[in-house]
Amino acid sequence: MSFDPSALVGRALVPAAVVAVFALLRKYMPARANAAHDDEIVDEDFTIANRVVCGSMILIGVAIALLAYKTLVTANRWVAETDGPAAFRLFPSSAIWWFFPGLAAVCLSWGTTLWLWSTFGDQKRIARFLAWTHQRAGFDSTGALRWMALLIVLPIGIASVLAIPLHSSLRDTNIVVGHYATLARQYLPYSQARRLVLVDGFRDRDGKFTQRAELLLDFKNGELWSSAANADFTPQVDLALFEFVRKKTGLAAEHVQSEEDLRP
């Protein structure tokens, strides 16, 4: 078995990055001193409160993630439906809709839980609990999560919203394609298609082959349409989709292992 130093370095980078982030947080966002409550914090037992808060964060985080994911998927489907009747609709991989919900759940569940607690609970006890958690973490965790929400979650949320128009609607006479960050549509008539190609997958920069079936249409104006652009990884092309496109274009299908194998 050959030794791969790059793999070892890659595995070591993650814990090293985590340690570095915590060190920076302790340096630039230290836990705030609170002399008025220091003695109370030492004497007060927050074990049960901490367990309740952690349990609530899990439930609230799951709710935030599911709500955000469902909202993005529903909006994506609604935009595609405005194309009118279609025999097939292809949507982006479901994975792209989970980045924002997942990060939002991590960064917003703590603040949401504290907000709900403050609505019904003792404000002074909540302040002491916050100071206790900050002392245990060694930094202002509440402030850190707020900055993460602003600098990481918000940009990814905006990027996710801009991806809502992505889709392909295969209609009787053409394919309607929705692109990133625009509601304008691209119309690709089947009559203008000049090549129909079945592709098995793709190769990375090192030449390693990855199975990902796609249906590729080459149009006379130089445009290319791929069924894999808006789809999950699949080992085979949907047979019904293939037959529909083949009949609409009237083209004989070519077959290649990857797009790099296509003849000019």
Image (spheres, grey):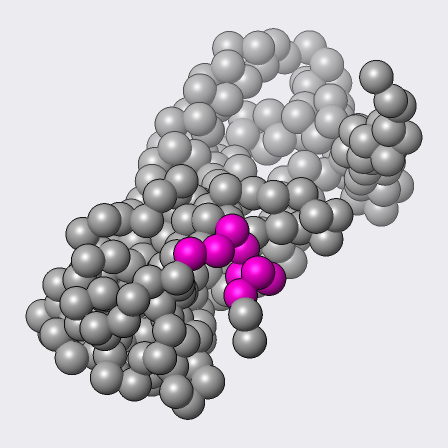
Left/right of residue 182 with respect to residue 1 in the rendered view: left
**Is 43 in front, or is 114?**
114
Q: Which residues are magenta?
A: 255-262
**Is 257 in front, or is 121?**
257
Name which residue lies at 68% across and 37% down: 141
Left/right of residue 47 with respect to residue 109 in the rendered view: right
How many numbered marks appear? Answer: 0
Residue 243 at x, y percent in the picture: 19, 58
Q: Quadrant of residue 90?
A: bottom left
Residue 238 at x, y percent in the picture: 26, 48
Name which residue lies at 81% across and 31% down: 7
Residue 107 visible, this orientation: no
Residue 75 at x, y percent in the picture: 27, 61
- Is residue 201 shown above or below 20? below
Name which residue lies at 48% across and 23% down: 53
Q: Quadrant of the C terminus?
A: bottom right
Residue 200 visible, this orientation: yes
**Is 158 in front, or is 129?**
158
Name which residue lies at 24% across and 79% down: 190
